[in-house]
Image: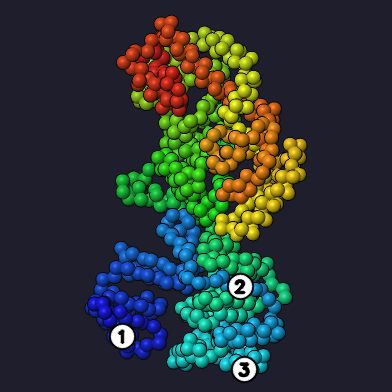
């Protein structure tokens, strides 16, 4: 009344004449906000200038209703509100087709609804109803069969004779149903026996006990919505799901989800389980649930992308084909790094959808800022994503990574280029191998790849005589390269074990095993004490000999499988608290006290060098390869066998770094021509 806005309502409780007046006002733009039921989607309802549609309880709308919403106006903004989105809508949000926002802050003084799955028992029902009536409250009793609803109401009157019982269902006359509902809302009725019409849109703060008869016949979202009718005040609420002694497996799974997820704001988790149980439906058809076999999401996006390109450019472009990346080490987001399944799922979804290296790096930095330094499996996950994207642009068909070696296979229609893959191999030295009749030496292979990269960058064909001549010169020089490399490598191989152990013991790198006793966020002091006591109990039993077997008691799934082994890691790769505890240990030592981090309490065993010597070998090898290449180039330049023009040195170094990802400024190579290096 205090604002110059006209608000009207349209529902089944209005007469036909009243509805006709509202429809006419809508056509003439005399109404600013219209609140209504499905009646607003009728063909006779026309909007003069529709700007925003807010759909409350979206799960109650069918596909035809939603198609009608689209027809109202294509450019209209649509805001959908629901506690339990249907599987297809949730899947579209998770996949990025629709924006998703979660409201996770509950109203003040709300408490979770205690949920019980019980058989139909008169004593239980009488006790629960009496407890609610004794504190001045009211009760919902949901029975979804109109044929027997009166009999159920009479039965409740016999069980609890002091209670006032009323019946409400959708086949009653509008005025009678409205009268019953008003009586219940105003506290004149103690027990409302109804069908699913109370599932949504009813707010009775004084009603805090609910019974759902034959809950095994209802869906997961329906049960969650029904449970939401109670617990809408500061009082503790109770929900009893009444079922027969035997129910089918699907119903048992649904009921277990409701019984488990009782926390405030659990609707999103319930909807995720509903999506898992029922399937995501059909993106190109009317099914809003079910498992799609004909059109999956990836194919749908590909078809959509190609159609958009065709409409925009006049001809369809080739499909984007990501490189097939296979790693022989784990690449995932560990539970002890990102505890929230929703947050983890969001990162996976976003990472899968990205096609730009810059966007992948931005997401990596975002994850690092939110959750701390990335553990090795997470770094590998982002690295593999980078390889897929960069490889797709360069025509890479597959990448196989094993230890410090990478095998790259290009598509038949692609010109092999390594320039650009540096983004994926950032900060990591890899020996790159390509199958060929006569194996190349490391240095020759590197020289040839530089030739390939530079020639392809200039637009040269690999069959161009000039390129072939350049490659021939480098092959003729192969004997000298190999001899020098072998001589240098021999000295390193003799010295490597002692040097590696010294570097390991001095803290250049670490290897450790750990046992985690997990601590949830917001844990009470009692829970913290219990977790620490459990950690101390394990610590008293721990020895270097039995540590791997004790890791079976860890709360981290991956640690159980690996005997708690974290592998090799460097400084800055673990959370600061954990790294500080590891640094304080000598190789072969077990922590004297549990190490506390944001994840919980860790018992740590720093592995002795003997346990990790084999893991150091490939690291030493790739380091020696890089030094050999750099030293060889420096020697060639100093002896005037190879000349790099001073004016081109900076450019040569830049090309070298961009081509293979080397970060050492001595790694400089442009184009090999007749025994000379020029920019």
Assess whether mark 3 and mark 1 are in contact (beta carbons under 8 angstroms).
no
Element on which disc 2 rests: strand
Q: In percent of the image, x 65 and y 20: which residue is there?
A: 497
Residue beneath disc 1: 20
Is residue 54 placed above or below 347 in the rendered structure? Answer: below
Mark 1 neighbour class, 10 Å CA radius: few under 14, some 14 to 19, many 20 or more: some
Q: Mark 2 or mark 1: name the one nearer the start of the chain.
A: 1
- Residue 284 position (above or below residue 417): below
Element class at badge 3: loop
* Dot label at residue 162: 3
Counting from the top left corner in percent of width and height, residue 295 is at 50, 55
22 sits to left or right of 385 = left
Crowd class of label 3 (few under 14; some 14 to 19; many from 20; radius 10 Å): few
Percent x, y of residue 56 = 42, 72
Disc sitting over residue 114 in the figure: 2
Relative to 632, say whether 323 is above or below.
Answer: below
Q: In the structure shown, which secondary structural element does the residue marked by tag 1 occupy?
A: helix
Specify which label sits upstream in the sequence, 2 or 3.
2
* Residue in the image at 31% along x and 76% along y: 33
Residue occupying image coordinates x 53% and y 27%: 430
Looking at the picture, tell me which residue is in the foreground, 336 or 19: 336
Q: How is the image coloured?
A: rainbow
N-terminal of the pair, mark 1 or mark 3, is 1
Q: Nearer the viewer, mark 1 or mark 3?
A: 3
């Amino acid at each position: 009344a205090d604002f110059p806005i006209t608000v009207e309502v349209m529902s089944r409780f209005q007469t036909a004449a009243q509805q006709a007046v509202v429809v006419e006002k809508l056509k003439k733009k005399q109404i600013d906000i219209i609140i209504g039921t499905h009646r607003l989607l009728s063909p006779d309802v026309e909007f003069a200038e529709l700007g925003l549609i807010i759909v409350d309880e979206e799960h109650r709308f069918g596909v035809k209703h939603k198609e009608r919403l689209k027809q109202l106006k294509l450019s209209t903004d649509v805001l959908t509100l629901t506690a339990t989105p249907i599987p297809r809508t949730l899947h579209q949000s998770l996949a990025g087709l629709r924006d998703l926002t979660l409201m996770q802050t509950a109203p003040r003084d709300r408490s979770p609804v205690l949920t019980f799955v019980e058989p139909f028992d008169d004593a239980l029902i009488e006790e629960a109803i009496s407890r609610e009536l004794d504190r001045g409250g009211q009760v919902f009793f949901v029975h979804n069969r109109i044929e027997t609803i009166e009999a159920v109401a009479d039965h409740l009157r016999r069980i609890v004779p002091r209670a006032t019982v009323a019946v409400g269902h959708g086949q009653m006359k509008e005025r009678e149903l409205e009268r019953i509902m008003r009586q219940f809302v105003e506290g004149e009725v103690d027990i409302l026996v109804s069908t699913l019409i109370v599932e949504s849109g009813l707010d009775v703060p004084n009603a805090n006990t609910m019974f759902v008869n034959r809950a095994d016949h209802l869906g997961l979202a329906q049960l969650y919505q029904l449970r939401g009718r109670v617990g809408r005040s500061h009082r503790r609420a109770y929900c009893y799901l009444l079922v027969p002694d035997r129910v089918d497996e699907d119903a048992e799974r649904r009921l277990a989800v409701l019984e488990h997820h009782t926390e405030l704001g659990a609707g999103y988790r319930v909807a995720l389980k509903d999506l898992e149980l029922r399937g995501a439906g059909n993106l190109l058809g009317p099914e809003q649930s079910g498992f799609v076999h004909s059109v999956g999401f990836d194919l749908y996006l590909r078809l959509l992308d190609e159609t958009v390109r065709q409409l925009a450019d006049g001809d369809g472009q080739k499909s984007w084909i990501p490189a097939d990346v296979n790693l022989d080490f784990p690449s995932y987001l560990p539970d002890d790094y990102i505890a929230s399944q929703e947050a983890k799922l969001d990162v996976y979804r976003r990472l899968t959808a990205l096609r730009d290296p810059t966007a992948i790096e931005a997401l990596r930095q975002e994850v690092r800022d939110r959750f701390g330094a990335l553990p090795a499996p997470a770094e590998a996950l982002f690295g593999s994503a980078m390889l897929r994207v960069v490889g797709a642009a360069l025509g890479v068909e597959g990448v196989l990574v094993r230890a410090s070696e990478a095998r790259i296979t290009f598509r038949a229609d692609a010109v092999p280029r390594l320039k650009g893959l540096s983004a994926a191999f950032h900060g990591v030295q890899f020996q790159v191998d390509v199958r060929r009749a006569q194996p190349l030496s490391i240095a020759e292979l590197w020289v040839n790849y530089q030739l390939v990269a530079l020639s392809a960058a200039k637009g040269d064909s690999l069959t161009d005589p000039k390129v072939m001549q350049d490659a021939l010169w480098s092959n003729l020089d192969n004997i000298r390269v190999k001899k020098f490399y072998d001589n240098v490598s021999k000295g390193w191989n003799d010295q490597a074990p002692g040097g590696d152990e010294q570097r390991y013991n001095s803290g250049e790198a670490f290897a450790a095993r750990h046992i985690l006793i997990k601590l949830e966020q917001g844990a009470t002091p009692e829970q913290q004490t219990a977790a620490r006591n459990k950690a101390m109990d394990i610590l008293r039993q721990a020895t270097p000999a039995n540590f791997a077997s004790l890791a079976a008691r860890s709360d981290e799934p991956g640690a159980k499988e690996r005997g708690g082994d974290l592998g090799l890691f460097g400084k800055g790769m673990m959370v600061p608290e954990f790294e500080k505890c590891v640094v304080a240990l000598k190789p072969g030592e077990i922590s004297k006290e549990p190490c506390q981090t944001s994840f919980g309490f860790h018992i740590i065993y720093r592995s002795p060098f003997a346990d990790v010597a084999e893991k150091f070998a490939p690291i030493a090898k790739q380091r020696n390869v890089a030094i050999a290449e750099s030293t060889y180039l420096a020697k060639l330049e100093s002896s005037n066998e190879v000349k790099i023009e001073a004016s081109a040195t900076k450019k040569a170094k830049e090309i070298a770094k961009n081509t293979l990802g080397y970060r050492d400024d001595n790694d400089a190579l442009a184009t090999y021509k007749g025994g000379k290096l020029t920019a």
